Image (cartoon, rainbow, N blue to C red):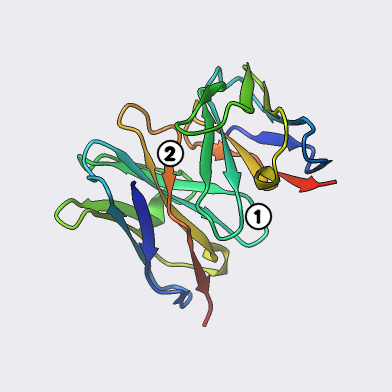
Amino acid sequence: EIVLTQSPATLSVSPGERATLSCRASQSVSSNLAWYQQKPGQPLRLLIYGAFTRATGIPARFSGSGSGTEFTLTISSLQSEDFAVYYCQQCDNWPYTFGQGTKLEIK
Amino acid sequence: QVQLQESGPGLVKPSETLSLTCTVSGGSISSYYWSWIRQPPGKGLEWIGYVYHSGTTNYNPSLKSRVTISTDTSKNQFSLKVRSVTAADTAVYYCARSPPYSSGWCDYWGQGTLVTVSS
């Protein structure tokens, strides 16, 4: 089973600044990686799939990069609604697995 | 707009069967992959398995012997059964949809339902 390690566990950033979240895979997942946003009481929201393709309706300030074992989610200018928990998820190998999440909080 | 809603008992006794249903509205259950994913309190997300609209399934090996996922196209629903539950099965259970060309990511999710296993 592929293990995804997200860092940092918690990231404190001021509104308007850039946030960079990392996800490392225990073995190569090629570009088969997705990112999700989770807010309390709301369904998870797909942000990125295929490592860098934005899902329908996702603002351009969200971008994904990387391949193989190292991936990054960048939020270019944080808005108040972006403070949430973010998960990466691999779909290269079954069972698909998730990282433990990064909590993005207001500084 | 596609919406998914989980339903089922919030409390299940140890050794019994956990049964949940996901009702899909705003779209057909046909031509997509449908998944169950869970999150124990304070822990990470675990993909339980998925079913294709045709009935083809794939289960997480860690749960395969206890899990069944199935569809009911007449009701636009799919369901999850987990047999012989223990406290370790206590979690928020999410249903989710994947696009027809890939089971790999989920573009629509339910809000989740907490199931507690306790006597």
Check the residue under mark 2 and report the chain it is in: B
Q: Position of residue A103 (x, y in %)?
A: 73, 46
The residue closer to the viewer here, B20 or B28, is: B28
- Identify the amino acid type marked 1: Lys
Is residue B82 visible to us here?
A: no
Residue B101 x, y percent position in the rendering: 32, 26
Reading the image, the residue beneath label 2 is: B107
Q: Quadrant of the N terminus of chain A?
A: top right
* Residue plotted at (29% across, 53% down): B24
Front tag of 2 and 1: 2
Between discs 2 and 1, the one toward the N terminus: 1
Q: Is residue B100 left or right of residue A99?
A: left
Secondary structure under badge 1? loop
Front position in the image: B94 or A30? B94
Mark 2 residue element: loop
Q: Residue furthest bottom?
A: B119
Viewer-proximal residue, A65 or A99?
A65
C-alpha distance separating marks 2 and 1:
22 Å
Tell me the number on the disc at residue B90.
none
Outermost residue toward the left in this view: B74
Tell me: residue B48, above or below residue B23. Answer: above
Q: Quadrant of residue B9?
A: bottom left
- In the shown orientation, is residue A1 left or right of residue B69? right
Percent x, y of residue B96? 41, 47
Q: Is residue A75 found left or right of B22 in the rendered image? A: right
Q: Which residue is mark 1?
A: B43
Q: Is residue A96 visible?
A: yes
Give residue A58's position: percent from left, percent from top: 53, 33
Q: Residues within 10 Å of mark 1 (few under 14, many from 20)?
A: few
The residue depicted at 34 percent of the width and 46 percent of the height is B1
Circle 2: residue type: Asp
- Relative to A20, say whether A86 is above or below: below
